[in-house]
Image: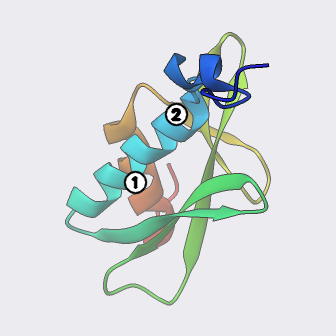
Amino acid sequence: MNFDKGRHAATLDVPPPRNDRRMHLSELDEGVRTHPELAGGLIERRGVTWVSVVRYGGPRRTVEIGCDFRDGQWWFCWAADGRPIRPACDVSATLDAVASELAGVSG
């Protein structure tokens, strides 16, 4: 037995597994921070991650946005009921849909 290396030393050079859900949610979070009407943040609780969003000047209402893999691609979805919003590759359209929802405009 060699005590010069840790028990799992061979695994230290391997990059961590890619987490596409977290990557898309981080991109949405960045978009929220740059959107003039929205504020929010990336939330993680018990291993589940989502983006919580509120609209400036609006009523005190927030929405939570998740990300699910459906029909062969990643989609942003309403965390409350799982309805899809837009494909995760379209952050701009997702932000517009969220802003409209928080403004009380259907769309």
Q: Is residue 50 left or right of residue 31?
A: right
Which amino acid is tagged 2? Arg
- Disc 1: which residue: 29
Q: Which residue lies at the image location 45% right of the left edge and 67% below the top edge?
A: 41
Q: Which residue lies at the image location 43% right of the left edge and 46% below the top edge?
A: 26
Q: Nearer the viewer, residue 55 or 29?
A: 29
Q: Which residue lies at the image location 58% right of the left edge and 67% below the top edge?
A: 63
Q: Nearer the viewer, residue 18 or 80?
A: 18
Q: Is residue 15 visible?
A: no
Element under label 1?
Answer: helix
Which amino acid is tagged 1? Asp
- Disc 2: which residue: 86
Colouring style = rainbow
Q: Nearer the viewer, residue 55 or 104?
A: 55
Question: Where is residue 55 drawn, in percent x and y?
Answer: 38, 75
Q: Is residue 9 left or right of residue 40?
A: right
Q: Is residue 90 above or below residue 104?
A: above
Q: Is residue 48 left or right of residue 96?
A: right
